[in-house]
Image (cartoon, rainbow, N blue to C red):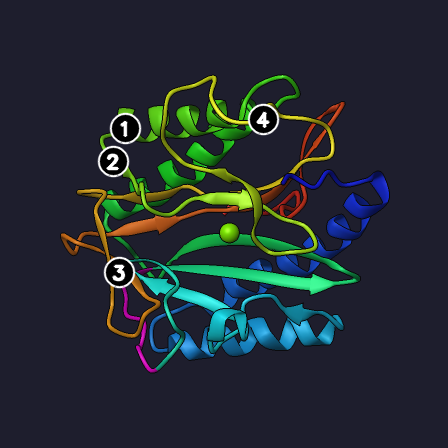
Amino acid sequence: MIYLKSNADIAIMRDNGKILTEIFKKLKNTIKAGITTKDIDTVVESIIYSRFAEPSFKGYRGFPAASCVSPNAEVVHGIPGEYVLKDGDIVGVDVGAFKNGFHVDAARTYAVGAISAEAERLVTVTRESFFKGVEQAVIGNRVSDISAAVQRYVEAAGFNVVRDMQGHGIGRSVHEDPRVPNFGMPGKGPKLRAGMVLAVEPMVSQGDFRIVTEPNGWTVVTKDGKLSAHYENTLALTDSGPEILTLDDGDMH
Ligand code: MG
């Protein structure tokens, strides 16, 4: 069941999106060698509460933190903890916030100090693939037009999209229909309609796309141990085109 959002619903989600852009702006100046992934979560959680919102992920099926923090070979759902970031790492930070009845969800991947040219390219291609998907997020297209555009761009760059995790509708629940895979043939799945709000989130592997879940039941890592990057925004489909609710003008990271 796909729940279409009214303009008033989208206005709330737009406001909530500003909480996430504030977080990402702060993290740009916070993330550096020597801090722990838990330190990142502390920043995320304090900003969410300071805006009288709730972290969408904390307590979700028992997840213990406000954010998912996933360095290097961790794809998504990394549990913030004692890992100390070091120069050359990349680290994905995925955050959801809930306020006035609606969730928003977004992720960025940050460089820690100077990273390799290949890691930089992975992060850049992952971000750019999201915008290739957005180009297809127009009324009358179908969900898999987004998926196919992401896959095409990522694979042309020599990387792979993770198959077993995907984007999703979002609104009163953090995960709603439809599913938004990052691969597939175009022209499949539900038709895109005004009022749909989607979390589009390419997860891209430097090597093989296969993943495994660690014994903690959460942390998803690449099977081959190679790097993975993640980029996500909450996207509202409107008659005048897609509107990204979790991105501010200066935030192209
Ligand atoms: Mg998501």
Q: Disc 1 marks which residue? A: 155
Specify whether tag 3 is near ligand 1 (CB below 8 Å): no
Q: Residues within 10 Å of mark 2 (few under 14, many from 20)?
A: many
* Residue at mark 3 to residue at mark 4: CA–CA distance: 34 Å
Q: Disc 3 marks which residue? A: 88
Q: Earlier in the sequence, mark 3 or mark 4?
A: 3
What's the residue at 58%, 61% (across, down)? 96
Residue 85 belongs to magenta span: yes
Residue sitting farthest toward the bottom? 82
Query: As displayed, is residue 185 above or below residue 202?
Result: above
Residue closest to the eye, 128 or 33: 128
Q: Residues within 10 Å of mark 1 (few under 14, many from 20)?
A: some
Picture coordinates of residue 130 (x, y %)? Answer: 47, 35
Circles 4 and 2: CB atoms closer than 8 Å: no
Report whether residue 252 is seen: no
**Mark 1 belongs to which amino acid?**
Glu
